[in-house]
Image (cartoon, rainbow, N blue to C red):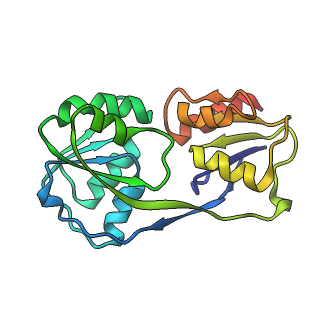
Amino acid sequence: MIYLVGSNLEFEGVKTLVLNKIKFNKFSVNLAEFDALVLTSKNSVNALKFNQILPASLQIYSIGDGTSCAAMEFGFAQIYTAKNAHGNDFAAEIAPFLKGKKTLFLRARETASSVGEILRESGVNLTQIIAYENVFKPLEKEQKPPKNSVIIFTAPSAVRNFTRNFGWDESYKAVAIGFTTAKELGNFTAPAVSAQQNINSCVNLAKTLL
C-alpha cells in the first residue's frame, strides 16, 4: 500500500494521511513598497488572502510550478519560476536577480532550508515575515500504515509529524520529494528521492517500489 504524508491531494491507489494543519498568522504589509517577493510555498500566497492583502505590481520569485500557479491565480503577473526547487539551491539561484531590490520573503515559522540566511549573506535587502506555521494534528494509532508500506513524504515537517505520531517500522520504504526531506528521513531509512519536486512524480516513483 502507498501512503501520502504532508498533502491532502488524492491519487488512485494512494491513501492520504493528514498529520498537520496550516495556521496563518495575522500581519499587515504594503506589497507596493517592495520590488520583489520571494515565495517558497503556496501557503505564503494563501497567507496574503487570509490577511486580505491585495496583489501589487512587483516581481515574484517562486520555488516551483505549484507556487507559481497560486501566485498567478492571486493576481500576480511578473513571475519567475526557479529552475531549482530545492530550498538552498533556489536561494542561490535567485540571489543575483535580487541585488539592489527591496525584497520581501513570506516564510513558515520553521524551515528546513536556509533561504533567508543565504539571501542576506548575498547582500539582498531582505524583509522576512513569518506568514504561517505548520501545526501537528495527531491521528489514531489504528491508522498507522502496515508493514512493507511505501510512504511518500512531501516536506521535512511531514517526516517529523509522522514519526512523532506513529514511530518508524524498518519494513517501510520511503519516497522523499526533495533533498531536505530526504535528509530528515536519513535518521530512519535511505529514501528514494523524486527526480522532480512534485507529488505526481513521487507517486509514480512509489509505484515502482511496491
Going by the image, does 141 lie left or right of 17? right
Q: Nearer the viewer, residue 189 or 115?
A: 115
How many marks the image carries: the answer is 0
Image position, residue 195 (x, y; %): 53, 26
Image position, residue 155 (x, y; %): 56, 44
Question: Can residue 116 be seen by looking at this rendering?
Answer: yes
Image position, residue 20 (x, y; %): 61, 60
Q: Quadrant of the N terminus?
A: top right
Q: Quadrant of the C terminus?
A: top right
- Residue shown at 68%/29% (left/top)? 191
Question: Can residue 11 be seen by looking at this rendering?
Answer: no
- Residue shown at 17%/64% (left/top)? 30
Q: Is residue 119 above or below residue 69?
A: above
Image position, residue 208 (x, y; %): 70, 28
Q: Nearer the viewer, residue 51 or 119?
A: 119
- Residue shown at 42%/57% (left/top)? 43
- Residue shown at 28%/73% (left/top)? 52
**In which quadrant of the rendered view does residue 201 lie?**
top right
**In which quadrant of the rendered view does residue 171 lie?**
top right
Q: Is residue 7 above or below residue 201?
A: below
Q: Nearer the viewer, residue 160 or 3?
A: 160
Going by the image, does 85 lie left or right of 95? right
Going by the image, does 21 lie left or right of 65? right
Q: Is residue 86 above or below residue 45?
A: above
Q: Is residue 86 above or below residue 164?
A: above
